[in-house]
Image: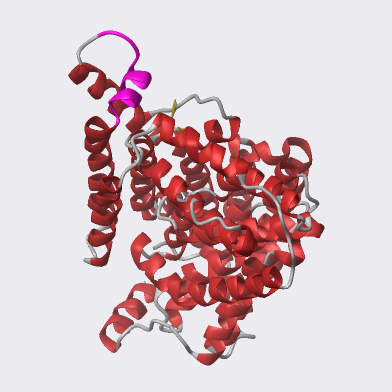
Amino acid sequence: MVVNRKEPTILESLFPILFLIVLLAINIMVFGTDGLSGSNQIVLILSAAVAGLLAFYRLKIPWDALQDGMVASISSAMSSILILLLIGALAGTWLLSGIVPAMIYYGLQILNPTIFLIAACIVSAIVSIATGSSWTTVATVGVALLGIGRALGFEEGLIAGSIISGAYFGDKMSPLSDTTNLAPAMAGTDLFTHIRHMTKTTFPSILITIIIFGIIGFTNSADGSVNQVKEISTVILEQFNINGWLFIVPAVVLFLIIKKVPAVPALLSGAILGGVFAVIFQPQVIQFIAGEGGSYIYQSFKAVMMALYGEISISTSNEIVNELLITSGMSGMLNTIWLIICAMMFGGILEVSGMLRVLAEAVIRSVHTVGSLIASTAATCVAFNFTTSDQYLAILVPGRMYADIYKKRGLKPENLSRTLEDSATVTSVLIPWNTCGATQASVLGVATLAYAPYCFFNIISPFMTILFGYMNWGINYYNEEELKEIQKELAV
């Protein structure tokens, strides 16, 4: 490790982050929600360049040391990049095999007008877990549920709040979600440890949310039709062979997770099994994706390979269903991987230059308990959601800032990754100028400030994680031997 020739000041350490925030604000105004397609990545590279110039000219750190820092930072995220690629592959074969459509179909069957708000929240959660995307859930099933809720006489802000609450619960608990993979990558833990640890705060939050929606729902009288949901279910049945055998595949993956099998072999097994079940149960879908010509073996090989690496879609007579039945395979993860690499370049320079350490030490001086540390982390994430208008940056930058602080306090990295998700992921949709808030308001046709007061899960989650911190509930600590190793690592 290179010793800095000059210690950065707080102002010098803040400058690259302030540059990042200002440039991102301009970028959002110009590109809006398309920022993830490349402009956000360029902003991160430019911010890394600014940090690098400061480190090189002001702090006198050799370029080789800065480059080594970036490479080391990117290397630390390689396992997460592999997982993201496999998740893209798994999403493709699970669509091809009918697993995701089956989850959506059975989720829609629980919809009941007498408990509409609870049902809307649960259906959105199921679809979001299945797809790994709150955005897809809101833009598809969410739009359908909004129409049904309006027909039933519910206020649109209330309906949107129940949909978004469920969608973001599913998003943060799904191993298919990019943010659910991003948070542990930044904190330094693995995907399944992160998900297991999140259940401690996430399930109480969603339970309270469902109770609130239940109280509101039972005190409102609403009558109407659920024809739109029935139409979606009918179209899914027409396109896929929906049966209980399909759930063997997610059950196997769940079993592997419980048995603490590493994420890469577990997800690869799920992706391969998805392809096998597609060949067995969905010959009509295989033929549709592969096209005319060749034997069924030829068509099966072609369709499964296409699902693993690239975009596939199933066309139906229903536009909402069409939006659900599309996936991009491994290639669909490349923008997120690109973002991670650029963010790790930025973080790597901040680390090797000592800027991140200076900022972290400034924070830690005012933090005296585990509760105040978690509260500071949550507040930082929310602040980044407000200032950078992007949930990914609200996970990436605080994740790098606080990683060593948690280790120094003897806290395992899953405590940090959980806090990142409980605060950064879920609050992004509550901010009108954030990409998430702007997108969901546009998709649903409901103003952010109209639905935000009813997004109970998103509001409760950061307070729940802070409560657990102050009460010392569900906190994972290093044992004495592990702590000694961590201290040696930090001292190097």
Q: Is there any visible trace of residue 15 in the rendered image?
A: no
Q: Could you tell me what secondary structure mostly forms the magenta stretch? A: helix
Q: Residue furthest top?
A: 293
Residue 84 screen position, x and y as percent: 39, 46
Residue 134 located left or right of residue 101 = right
Occupied quadrant, residue 141: top right
Front-lying residue, 263 or 477: 263
Q: Is there any visible trace of residue 24 in the rendered image?
A: yes
- In this view, 300 is above or below 176: above
- In this view, 325 is above or below 212: above
Going 47% across and 49% down the picture, which residue do you hit? 132
Front-lying residue, 176 or 6: 176
Q: Quadrant of the N terminus?
A: bottom left
Q: Quadrant of the C terminus?
A: bottom left
Front-lying residue, 46 or 328: 328
Going 38% across and 55% down the picture, which residue do you hit? 76
Residue 269 located left or right of residue 471 = left
Residue 327 screen position, x and y as percent: 45, 34
Assess whether residue 226 is covered by the magenta stretch.
Answer: no
Q: Which residues are magenta?
A: 282-293
- In this view, 182 is above or below 271: below
Going 54% across and 38% down the picture, which residue do you hit? 232
